């Protein structure tokens, strides 16, 4: 029995080590990579020019000196980057593949609109492409934060799903390339949109002096959100800069479906302002230690454009 991975002309024999390049190893990409290492893959990544935090997050991966080195050695390349960088990173992967003379299978796992998926695929011209999206927290052994699913679409999606990862649930969707991203745009609109709604609603309630009464009223309907409100909003704030482009991708997705895009264009504005707050400057690791809801809401008070809150 054989499994085809990477170059369509090359048969990867069952039991042969699969080589996976992660671009790039932030919290999510590193957790994906470490799980694939546990599953028996060789996982490479390049952190040259990246922050000390990223270097620390990439522990357990094989670090190489350049993107060319990572792509050139890989059967499979996984792009896990902020949505605003997806097309540029796809171009860089394509250049590295051309420079090193390889044809890896490339999966884009970013939070992007189906129309952006088309641009990513065009940037990877000549390389086989899988559309993917991730639902849930980084699938790390220490996180203990619930299940993580990897949704995949496209003719070769099954090859990415076949990679062994002990904490990841792969799901191959029927339909054309773009289905996995369309799903992500739908689920993220609720997950991150709900966080933005809670943020604005609780900030307004605190200003009016009715925050405790509001949370008491909401608790029966939203027990998980109210019970962990401070840590949830703080963690969301630490990712606000990434959420801005994601909200715009959702707006574009909804516009393409004939729906008004203004709702998620406004959500992008909310997260832009949160990104300028003191909590927006924190890393997720730093934000994870904050739990006092009132204190977090004060720090996340949404200023008028150009006027960050004073803490």
Image: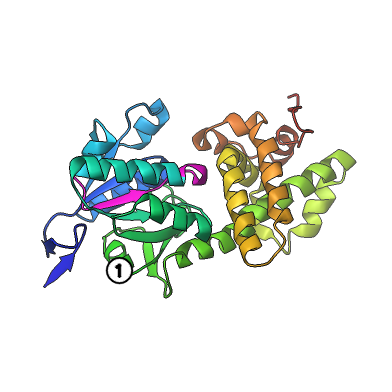
| Residue 11 image position (x, y, % from top left) | 12, 63
* SS at badge 1: helix
| Picture quarter with the N terminus | bottom left
Q: Residue furthest bottom?
A: 174
Relative side of 162 to 1, left or right: right
| Residue 34 image position (x, y, % from top left) | 29, 47
| Residue 149 image position (x, y, % from top left) | 43, 62
User: What residue is shown at x 63% (from left), y 67% (from top)?
Assistant: 257
Q: Residue furthest right?
A: 208
Relative side of 146 to 309, left or right: left
In this rendering, the answer to whether 269 lies above or below 224 is: above
Tag 1 residue: 158
Total marks placed: 1
Q: Quadrant of residue 93?
A: top left
Residue 139 visible in rendering: no
Q: Name the foreground residue: 178 vs 168.
A: 178
Relative side of 31 to 118, left or right: left
User: Crowding at label 1, few (<14), some or many (≥20) Cα neighbours within 10 Å?
Assistant: some
Residue 8 visible in rendering: yes
In this rendering, the answer to whether 233 lies above or below 192 is: above
| Picture quarter with the C terminus | top right
Relative side of 89 to 310, left or right: left
In this rendering, the answer to whether 102 lies above or below 253 is: above
| Residue 68 image position (x, y, % from top left) | 24, 37
User: What residue is shown at x 18% (from left), y 45% (from top)?
Assistant: 101
User: What residue is shown at x 65% (from left), y 61% (from top)?
Assistant: 255
Q: Indicate whether residue 71 is drawn in magenta.
A: no
Residue range in magenta is: 73-85
Q: Name the foreground residue: 200 vs 18.
A: 18
Q: Quadrant of residue 261?
A: bottom right
Q: Indicate whether residue 83 is drawn in magenta.
A: yes
């Amino acid at each position: 029995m054989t499994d085809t991975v990477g170059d369509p002309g090359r048969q990867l024999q069952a039991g042969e080590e699969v080589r996976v390049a992660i671009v790039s190893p932030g919290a999510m990409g590193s957790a994906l990579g470490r799980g694939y290492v546990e599953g028996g893959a060789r996982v490479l990544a390049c952190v040259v020019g990246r922050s000390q935090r990223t270097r620390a997050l990439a522990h357990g991966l094989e670090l190489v000196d350049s993107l060319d080195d990572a792509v050139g050695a890989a059967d499979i390349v996984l792009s896990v980057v902020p949505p605003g960088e997806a097309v540029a990173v796809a171009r860089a992967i394509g250049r590295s593949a051309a420079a090193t003379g390889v044809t890896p299978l490339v999966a884009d796992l970013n939070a992007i609109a189906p129309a952006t998926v088309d641009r990513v695929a065009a940037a990877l011209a000549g390389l086989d492409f899988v559309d993917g999206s991730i639902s849930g927290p980084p699938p790390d052994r220490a996180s203990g934060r619930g299940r993580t699913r990897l949704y995949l679409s496209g003719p070769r999606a099954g090859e990415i799903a076949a990679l062994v990862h002990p904490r990841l649930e792969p799901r191959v969707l029927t339909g054309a390339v773009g289905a996995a991203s369309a799903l992500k745009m739908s689920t993220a609109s609720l997950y991150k949109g709900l966080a933005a709604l809670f943020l604005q609603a609780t900030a307004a309630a605190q200003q009016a002096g009715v925050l405790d009464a509001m949370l008491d009223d909401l608790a029966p309907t939203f027990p998980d959100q109210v019970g962990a409100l401070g840590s949830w909003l703080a963690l969301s704030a630490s990712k606000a800069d990434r959420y801005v482009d994601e909200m715009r991708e959702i707006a574009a997705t909804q516009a393409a479906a004939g729906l008004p895009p203004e709702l998620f264009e406004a959500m992008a504005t909310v997260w832009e302002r949160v990104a300028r707050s003191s909590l927006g400057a924190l890393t997720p690791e730093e934000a994870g230690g904050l739990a006092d809801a009132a204190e977090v809401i004060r720090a996340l008070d949404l200023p008028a454009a150009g006027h960050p809150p004073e803490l």
